[in-house]
Amino acid sequence: MVGSRSSSGPPGKTTFWGWFFIAIGSIFLPVFVFAAVVSKLLPPSNNPVIAAVQKDRYYCLLVPLTLPVLVVAIYFHWLSMKLFKHA
């Protein structure tokens, strides 16, 4: 059809949610990097929140353990695209 619009919603609302998700991601990335890397390099803190983040081992192990899963997911994505292309 010529002139048909996408059913994703009004352009203003879609633009708002796009910028919203970019802003949230831009905020959470430095927070995660601080929790996973920088807080381990700092001296012990008297602040209970920062001390809890420094003692936490979950986030510093999350990234290395996620990488093999990411490789498998990328392989399956590549495989499905090949199967779809040659079907």
Image: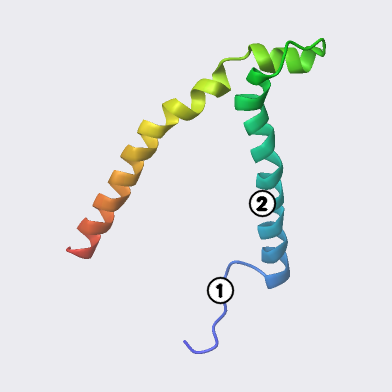
The residue lying at 50 percent from left, 21 percent from top is 61
Residue 15 is situated, as x and y percent measured from the top left of the image, at 69, 65
Residue 57 is situated, as x and y percent measured from the top left of the image, at 57, 15
Between 23 and 16, the one lying in front of the other is 23
The residue lying at 60 percent from left, 25 percent from top is 36
Instruction: Using the rendered view, name the quadrant where residue 82 is placed.
Output: bottom left
Residue 23 is situated, as x and y percent measured from the top left of the image, at 71, 50
Residue extending furthest toward the left? 86
Please give the label number shown on residue 58: none
Identity, as a three-letter code, of the amino acid under mark 1: Ser
Report crowding for label 1: few under 14, some 14 to 19, many 20 or more residues within 10 A (C-alpha): few
Is 87 displayed left or right of 77 in the figure? left
* Residue beneath disc 2: 21
The residue lying at 63 percent from left, 32 percent from top is 33
Residue extending furthest toward the right? 47
* Residue beneath disc 1: 6
Is 66 displayed left or right of 39 in the figure? left
SS at circle 2: helix
Report crowding for label 2: few under 14, some 14 to 19, many 20 or more residues within 10 A (C-alpha): few
Residue 27 is situated, as x and y percent measured from the top left of the image, at 71, 42
Identity, as a three-letter code, of the amino acid under mark 2: Phe
